[in-house]
Amino acid sequence: MPMIALAALAAGTVLQPLGDWHGWVTVKDYPVEAVLAQAEGIAAFALTIDANGLPEDCRITKSAGSKLLDDQTCAIMLIRARFRPPTDRKGRIVPATYRQSIRWRLPPNAKREEVVDRSFDARATIAANGNVTDCALSGAGATRLAQAKGSCGPFGNRDFLAFFLKDNYAKTRGTNVRLSVNFDGNSPPAPAKPPRIYAILAKAAIEIGKDGAMTSCTSVTALSALGRTLDLCDFIKTDPPRYGPQPNPRKATILLDLSADYN
């Protein structure tokens, strides 16, 4: 669970936390995305404290090795950290800097074996004659597709890809069909290089309870291709995603999208 290390205060400044600062960060503050990434580390930070004892600014002085944990560290400190008005040695109220570190450690019930993520990438290579020569599956949900090595099932099928790419298929040399889970209105991670073609194939909205289990799934857009329809909710309900515990229920969007590049 997250642990707060002892503070190193600015020399010559008296700065006293209000209440029990050990409770400023709890295990429930661990970001879901960080649990999925199995991110751990120590985030050192510096808070600028105003004359009223309230934090004005937070900066990370040493990264935990995860932007998710760094961002969560400052977000929590700006909301929860409270102090008595800081004074100098003569008792005069002055601004001050509060330096601490948080050790983020995954709770036992949030280890990878307790987290089921359905996200995957299916990357296909297409030859000049239009044949799919290879397709590689990756991501936490890849093993749940149970495809043979070098195969991505329908997501690496020539007819399936040609149906969506239409006239662009003849010049396409690589595709990526991706299933992503995006929390609280966030967008899926953008590729380093924008693809020539991008399309959303299917979309669903889910809700995650406090215990990390999926409580509902509503189809927004179903995948329809080659006379068949795929409802994402039907696809994931047989083996639903499960995440670490959180203080409040959360909403997420599941996207199945297609990107393609060509010469």
Image (tube, helix red, strand yellow):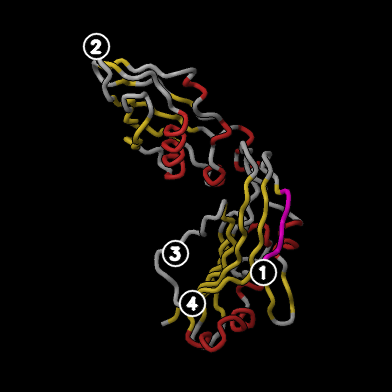
The stretch of residues the image draws in magenta is 215-220
At label 1, the amino acid type is: Thr
Q: CA distance from mark 4 to mark 3?
A: 12 Å
Q: Dividing the picture into quarters, in which one does residue 263 lie?
A: bottom left
What's under tag 3, amino acid-wise?
Answer: Pro
Q: Residue at x 35, y 24 (%)?
A: 52
Q: Quadrant of the N terminus?
A: top right
Residue 149 position in % (x across, y down): 61, 66
Pointer 2 residue: 89
Q: Image check: 129 left or right of 70?
A: right
- Residue positioned 33% across, 37% down in the render: 59
Mark 4 and mark 1 lie on one chain; the one further toward the N terminus is: 4
- Mark 4 falls on what kind of element? strand
User: In the figure, residue 14 lies in which quadrant?
Assistant: top left
Mark 4 surroundings: few (<14), some (14-19) or many (≥20) residues within 10 A: some
Q: Earlier in the sequence, mark 2 or mark 4?
A: 2
Vertical placement of residue 187 versus 76, above or below:
below
Q: Earlier in the sequence, mark 4 or mark 3?
A: 3
Where is residue 232 shown, x and y percent of the image? 69, 64
Question: Is residue 142 part of the magenta span, yes or no?
Answer: no
Instruction: Determine which of the numbered discs, if any, sits on residue 197 in the image.
Output: 4
Question: Disc 4 and disc 1: Cα gap in Å?
Answer: 19 Å
Residue 141 versus residue 45: which sits nearer the camera? Answer: 45
**Contact (Cβ within 8 Å) of mark 4 with mark 3:** no
The tag on residue 221 is 1
Q: Give the Cα separation between the discs numbered 2 and 4.
A: 64 Å
Q: Residue at x 65, y 66 (%)?
A: 148
* Near-viewer residue (260 or 186): 186
Residue receiving disc 3: 191
Looking at the image, residue 168 sits to the left or right of residue 17; the answer is right
